[in-house]
Amino acid sequence: MSYKTLLVHLDDSRRCSARVELALDLAGRWNAHLIGLYVVCQDMLEPLRRPDEPLKLAVYERLCDERRRQAEAAFLEAAERAGRRVEWRAPAGPSTDTAMLHARHADLIVLGQFNPHDRTTTIAHHFVEDVLMGSGRPAIVVPYAGQVRTIGENVLVAWDGGREAARAIGDALPLLERARFVTVETVERRRPDPDKTPAGVDVAAYLERHGIQASFSATPRDGDIGSGATLLNRSSDLNADLIVMGAYSHTRIHERVLGGATRTILETMTVPVLMSH
């Protein structure tokens, strides 16, 4: 299996270049077509505003054009350095709806974690979640902090037996086939029963039939911090450079109000995460 079309979301944030480099690396692995999709929330005027000039319509349009040209030049220059042919798109329309539409024609999309500390992150707060849920495509979400030196060499697969987790494993197969280490991890509410068949053994057998050697383990949930934080701690213990997981096995409103693994990961991720719904 392989990915033939990748789409990376571009905006004006400082972290955008890291997403581009990662997307170019992934495109090179499968000789895939890479689309750079530049969409920003047009109603978020503050990141474009300069203190020394009033924000009139003409000024705003000029600043938008300037930012768009800068983003295009940076994307094409990065592609040229990597020796990759890419496609640039900057469609008009509502940012989230437009991103979902274009993402539906890709095998894999690359998004950036929302960064509340970067005023140039011109996307809606729930942009990543909405695109992930609305596009029907798997997404790799890149954290806004830290460096991504490798991706997909040491993979932690989060398994809870649910539909979303099964979908994520299937969507991640091209990456898993190239990984050096794969661990199927189940977070238990209590200490695993030694007489019970481990939950991940069937997943490991499934992966083995795809030529993927995977280990499996179960970890009791770490106190009251929840499954998401336990997975992040486990990924740190294993030095994983990618987490594969299903997104929103509960309703989104449930997770936003009460918390959940997806919400925790999206807010506090430390490594890239491939999510599917």
Image (cartoon, rainbow, N blue to C red):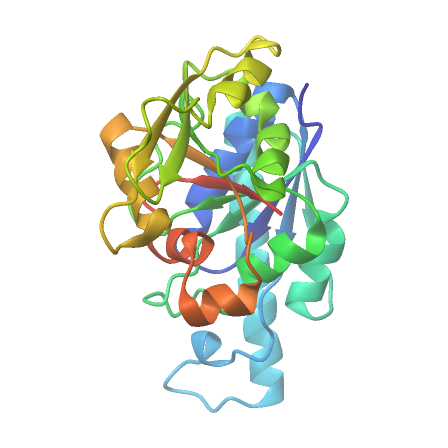
* Residue at 28% from the left image edge and 36% from the top image edge: 191
Indicate whether 80 appears above or below 201: below
The answer to whether 230 appears left or right of 65 in the picture is left
| Residue 123 in view here | no
Residue sitting farthest toward the front:
195
Indicate whether 111 appears above or below 259: above
- Front in this rendered view, residue 165 or 132: 165
Indicate whether 272 appears above or below 99: above
Dividing the picture into quadrants, the one containing residue 166 is: top right
Dividing the picture into quadrants, the one containing residue 117 is: bottom left
* Residue at 53% from the left image edge and 12% from the top image edge: 212
Q: Position of residue 251 (x, y in %)?
A: 58, 62
- Tally of numbered discs: 0
Q: Quarter of the image containing the N terminus? A: top right
The answer to whether 197 appears left or right of 87 in the picture is left
Indicate whether 126 appears above or below 153: below
Dividing the picture into quadrants, the one containing residue 232 is: top left
- Front in this rendered view, residue 5 or 53: 5
Q: Position of residue 2 (x, y in %)?
A: 67, 21
- Front in this rendered view, residue 15 or 266: 266
Q: Position of residue 47 (x, y in %)?
A: 44, 74
* Residue at 68% from the left image edge and 44% from the top image edge: 137
| Residue 72 in view here | yes
* Residue at 59% from the left image edge and 17% from the top image edge: 206
The answer to whether 168 appears left or right of 104 in the picture is left
